[in-house]
Image (cartoon, rainbow, N blue to C red):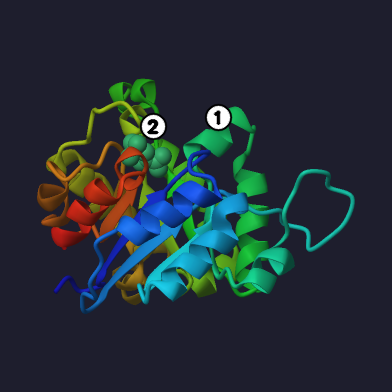
Amino acid sequence: MKPRGVLLAGNWKMNHGPAAARGFFEALPWSGKEGAIMRIYPSFLALPTALDAVKTGGKKIEIGAQNFHAEKSGAFTGEVSGPMLQEIGIRQVLLGHSERRQYFAETPPLILKKTVSALQQGFEVLLCIGETLDERNGGQTLSVLTHQLESTLADPTCAAAFGKTLHLAYEPVWAIGTGVTATPTQAQETHASLRGLISRTLGQDIANAVRILYGGSVTPANFAELLACPDIDGGLVGGASLKPDSFGALWSLI
Ligand code: PEP
């Protein structure tokens, strides 16, 4: 068993409404695995159905939200707050995804605000970071990731939550939805550097406790090799999480 266990998380993005969500969970092959967690982040609209489907099916699958608003209520048209999510039984949120950064102009200060608010409201946060292809080719991978993480590492709420209710997903932007995966060597090097950064900032014990998931074109064909790397603690999966067969095949590799 991996020291931090394994988290296999699926990010459905803007796919699967309630009916498709129910069909997915009914068809998904699932069996308990010691120390491993399966989690899906459906759209807001499919959250109640997903919660009901896993409960009815007796499948211990965590259901999380892809986003939330940092304020608890107020004049924020179109947004969903933490208390609303908690009311229906959601305890996990995904934050900082590159699509939120790119298409919804989420900046590091905004992502920090959401992260702090989520942690203070008792959510577990999976925080995504990652560099673009130009940044990698320019040798800037680590400086970009450090910049994306530094305010989080410096914040007292986040610092106290790292390794407990705050974990990371390293998702190179050039690998998301492209069919190009980071090689196990590239991913392991980056994960080890991130763990080193956390260790230098918050100490080795916390660094050892933080799960760092890899995300970016994970499929059943490449997941085992990635998971064999010592600093890769699971996968955040987009495309291959949409079909019960492929997500079930990833789970069977754990
Ligand atoms: C993602 O969006 O988080 C992701 C990793 O997508 P994909 O697996 O499709 O590359």
For the point 43% across and 37% down, which residue is it?
144
Image position of 248 with respect to 175: above or below: below
Q: Determine the quadrant in which ligand 1 lies.
A: top left
Q: How far apart are the alpha carbons under marks 2 and 1?
A: 10 Å
Image position of 244 with respect to 100: above or below: below
* Drawn side of residue 188 relative to residue 107, left or right: left
Image position of 98 with respect to 25: above or below: above
Which of pointers 2 and 1 lies earlier in the amino acid sequence? 1
Q: Tell me, yes or no, if residue 93 can be seen here.
A: no
Give the quarter of the figure containing the N terminus. bottom left
What amino acid type should be assigned to the residue bearing mark 1? Answer: Gln
* Drawn side of residue 212 relative to residue 121, left or right: left
Query: Which quarter of the picture shows residue 25?
Result: bottom left
Where residue 38 appears, as percent x and y from the top left, is 33, 65
Q: Which residue was labeled with disc 1?
A: 102
Where residue 139 appears, as percent x and y from the top left, is 30, 27
Query: Which quarter of the picture shows residue 248?
Result: bottom left
Q: Nearer the viewer, residue 232 or 157?
A: 232
Q: Tell me, yes or no, if residue 251 can be seen here.
A: yes
* Drawn side of residue 37 relative to residue 86, left or right: left
What amino acid type should be assigned to the residue bearing mark 2? Answer: Val
Q: Nearer the viewer, residue 59 or 216?
A: 59
For the point 61% across and 75% down, which residue is it?
122
Q: Which labelled disc corresponds to residue 173?
A: 2
Q: Which labelled disc corresponds to residue 83?
A: none
**What kind of element bears circle 1?**
helix
Q: Is the residue marked 2 within 8 Å of ligand 1, measured from its CB?
A: no
Where residue 41 appears, as percent x and y from the top left, is 47, 54
Is there CB contact under 8 Å for labels 2 and 1? yes
* Drawn side of residue 117 relative to residue 133, left or right: right
Give the quarter of the figure containing the C terminus. bottom left
Image position of 80 with respect to 209: above or below: above
